[in-house]
Image: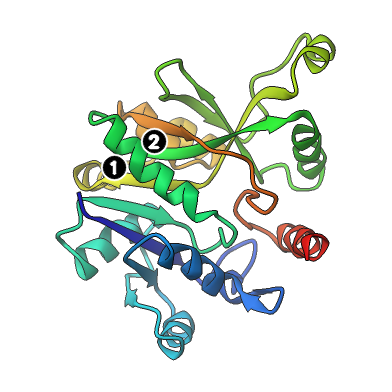
Amino acid sequence: MKPLIVIPARYASTRFPGKPLAEIGGIAMLERTAMVAHKVGDFVVATDDDRIEDFCRERDLPVVMTDPDLLSGSDRAKVAADLFDPSADLIVNLQGDAPFTPPAYVQACLDALTADPSADISTPVVALSWDALDELRDAKKATPFSGTCAIVGDDGRARWFSKNIIPAIRKESSMREENETSPVLQHVGLYAYRRAALARYVTLPPSPYEQLEGLEQLRALENGLTIACARVDSHPMSQAGIDTPEDLARAEARLASLS
């Protein structure tokens, strides 16, 4: 199977205009994301803005222009894949605001679709340590809609996702004493699609819970598409996507602490 990594990058973010070109440690967020993709395989940036197109061309990053009226990163990924490489079987949607995604996470998504041939989509999840869970809870006090959690069945497939921290833990004190890892799985905003699944997904109207939570992947689940979850190891910089200036400040601080 032939994969293609698509990096959707919009300039006109409501919460953080110009986000893909914001610098972290002196390197633009989009350029960091492209460096991740390059370590795994072929990639293309999909944008709707001349400023991002110019940025890519100045750095010899492959880029295609897409319609600014496309509703989501998944729509942009589908159009970009059709334009750039119609022969790709697997299409990875690596958001331009996920600059610290470990390349191993991207590969894990591709491997998950190989291991589960009937799955339509794959995505990574990280089992949070208790300390990491405490950090997520603290972060949600300031930015409650940053960070997503997942419920995964014994078959490795997603049952649900939420911007709330799920599951609720009734006996947390005793569980903290018995286990180093919490039962909370944090979702990493990265997807690999079979081409046919992506083509179907973008024809579906926004679903009720997708609109309530602001999570595209719920549209897939609500319409019977299957999502294989690749469990990956935690990484000190693999936080959720950077959605706000507050997220950027946290990433900058974390990067400085590790240098």
**Identity, as a three-letter code, of the amino acid under mark 1:** Tyr
On the picture, is 249 further left or further right than 97?
right
The residue that appears at 38% across and 41% down in the rendered structure is 206
Mark number displayed over residue 219: 2
How busy is the neighbourhood of tag 1: few (under 14 within 10 Å), some, or many (20 plus)?
many
Picture layout, residue 173 above or below residue 200: above
Provide residue 57's location: percent of width, then percent of height: 40, 87
Q: Secondary structure at mark 2?
A: helix
Q: Which quarter of the figure has residue 88?
A: bottom left
The residue that appears at 29% across and 41% down in the rendered structure is 204
Q: Nearer the viewer, residue 103 or 19?
A: 103
Q: Which quarter of the figure has residue 139?
A: top right
Q: Which quarter of the figure has residue 252?
A: bottom right
Tell me the quadrant of the picture where the C terminus can be found: bottom right
**Identity, as a three-letter code, of the amino acid under mark 2:** Arg
Picture layout, residue 59 above or below residue 104: below
On the picture, is 222 further left or further right than 83?
right
Q: Secondary structure at mark 1?
A: helix
Provide residue 126's location: percent of width, then percent of height: 59, 35
Provide residue 21's location: percent of width, then percent of height: 58, 76
The residue that appears at 79% across and 14% down in the rendered structure is 172
Q: Are marks 1 and 2 in contact (CB under 8 Å)?
A: yes
Q: Earlier in the sequence, mark 1 or mark 2?
A: 1
Q: Dot 1 corresponds to which residue? A: 201
On the picture, is 228 further left or further right than 179?
left
